Image (spheres, grey):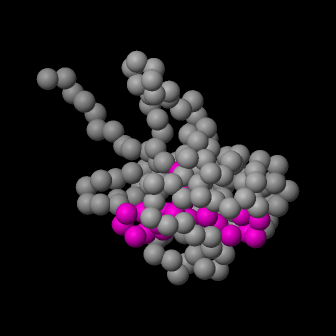
């Protein structure tokens, strides 16, 4: 039997803010808050499922599907690449980007993939039930926006 190397699922996530500088989070089936995003699509051999060309394109697609928001993917966030084990023996590589919301006044909508959505200030995030990696990513995006606001607006 030929050797098949183990594969790591990769999930791209985005820190996206509304017009009031609140971060959009989604509650999952484990009752944890998480950032919107998802797995990269590898495509199907028959071409019915198209592969994502880049992680950034995958993230923009996922955020649109999960929230109805249109975003531009920005920088990888400092500390935003980490390994998460949502259930025992199931590890996922999380890659987190800061995103610019192209319609920040538009209300987000919830998809069938999540139980609830919420908009939270930077001060509210540390108290939420969510993995520390997501909390670090949110804090990194707020720090970056404070230190280099013009850079964050250009994305």
Instruction: Find the magenta span and give its range.
Output: 18-37
* 8 shown above or below 81: above
* 138 shown above or below 62: below
- Provide residue 75's location: percent of width, then percent of height: 68, 49
Residue, x 57% and y 30% (percent of image)? 53
Is residue 75 toward the left or the right of residue 95 in the image? right
- Provide residue 108's location: percent of width, then percent of height: 63, 59
- Provide residue 56's location: percent of width, then percent of height: 61, 41
Extreme-right residue of the structure: 150
Is residue 13 visible to us here?
no
Q: Main secondary structure of the magenta part?
A: loop
Is residue 93 visible to us here?
yes
- How many tags in the picture? 0
Is residue 154 toward the left or the right of residue 39 in the image? right
Nearer-the-camera pick, 147 or 124? 124
Nearer-the-camera pick, 12 or 22? 22
Residue, x 44% and y 54% (percent of image)? 113
């Amino acid at each position: 039997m030929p050797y098949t190397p183990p594969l790591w699922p990769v999930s791209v996530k985005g820190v996206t803010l509304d017009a009031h500088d609140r971060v959009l989070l989604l509650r999952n089936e484990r009752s944890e808050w998480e950032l919107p995003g998802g797995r990269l699509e590898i495509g199907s051999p028959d071409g019915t499922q198209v592969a994502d060309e880049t992680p950034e394109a995958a993230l923009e697609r996922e955020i649109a599907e999960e929230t109805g928001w249109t975003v531009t993917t920005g920088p990888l966030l400092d500390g935003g690449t980490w390994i998460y084990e949502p259930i025992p023996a199931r590890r996922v590589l999380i890659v987190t980007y800061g995103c610019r919301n192209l319609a920040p006044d538009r209300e987000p909508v919830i998809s069938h993939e999540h139980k609830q959505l919420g908009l939270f200030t930077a001060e509210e995030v540390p108290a939420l039930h969510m993995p520390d990696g997501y909390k670090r990513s949110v804090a990194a995006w707020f720090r970056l926006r404070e230190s280099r606001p013009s850079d964050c607006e250009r994305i």
